[in-house]
Image (cartoon, rainbow, N blue to C red):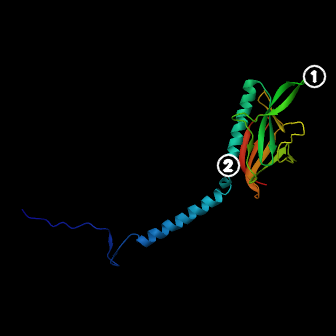
Amino acid sequence: MTRRRCRPRFAAVNTQFGHQQGFSLLEIMLVVVIVGIMISLATLSIGSVSDDGIDEHSRRLKVLLELATEEASIRGRELGLRFYQHGYEFSVQVLEVDAEGVSGWIWVPLDQDRLLKPRNFGEDITLDLEIEDEEVTLDYERDTEQTYTPQVFILSSGDIAPAFMVRIRPSFASDGIKLAVDELGTVEMSRDEF
């Protein structure tokens, strides 16, 4: 039995120049570094707003608005929403009887509610409010000296009155996230510049 000699198989060799075709380790490392820099730049440009928690606060407000609308419809009660420069709070309309036996409807903030409790973002995040295309000057906090009244009403019919737009943004920046809410309770969330 004769043995056949097998030729070993190697990478393709360019016989004209006498070296192998392919990429060197240096070329591969250079490509990896360039791709890494491009990804970092893209992340920084896209994530500049979300780094401040604006996205999370906006999504939470959207979900809470939808929840409040459903709760008002299911329980048949009127809810309210009041915005401040650095937060917001929900309230409920209740019937109160005073010491003289006179009854009347008043608004009571839902301070003890597990889901609809007041939210304060701190001074790093600011809210801008427009009601029916008119800018509203927001208080810093609840004024206990005045009669409490919400700015937005969430009705037991499931409607919201009036339509409004709230912008959540870092305090010293102009870009943020806008939530536009119509009378039917539909919430549209988008990035926005002030």
Which of the pair 16/19 is nearer the observer?
A: 19
Q: For mark 1, what is the residue?
A: 100
Where is residue 117 drawn, in percent x and y? 73, 37
Q: Is residue 181 visible?
A: no
Q: Is residue 34 left or right of residue 177?
A: left
The residue tagged with tag 2: helix, strand or loop? Answer: helix
Total numbered circles:
2
Residue at 93%, 22% in the rendered image: 100
Q: Residue type at mark 1?
A: Glu
Which of the pair 20/151 is nearer the observer?
A: 151
| Residue 183 placement: quadrant | top right
Where is residue 36 drawn, in percent x and y? 53, 64
Which of the pair 108/155 is nearer the observer?
A: 108
The residue tagged with tag 1: helix, strand or loop? Answer: loop
Spot the residue most to the top. 101
Figure quadrant of the N terminus: bottom left
Q: Is residue 186 left or right of residue 5?
A: right
Relative vertical location of residue 20 with respect to residue 41 in this rendering, above or below: below
| Residue 22 placement: quadrant | bottom left
Spot the residue most to the front. 99
Q: Is residue 99 visible?
A: yes
Q: For mark 2, what is the residue?
A: 55
Q: Are marks 2 and 1 in contact (CB under 8 Å)?
A: no
Where is residue 49 drawn, in percent x and y? 68, 55
| Residue 44 placement: quadrant | bottom right
Q: Is residue 129 left or right of residue 34?
A: right
Spot the residue most to the bottom. 17
Where is residue 20 drawn, in percent x and y? 34, 73
Q: Residue type at mark 2?
A: Asp
Figure quadrant of the C terminus: bottom right
Residue at 46%, 69% in the rendered image: 29
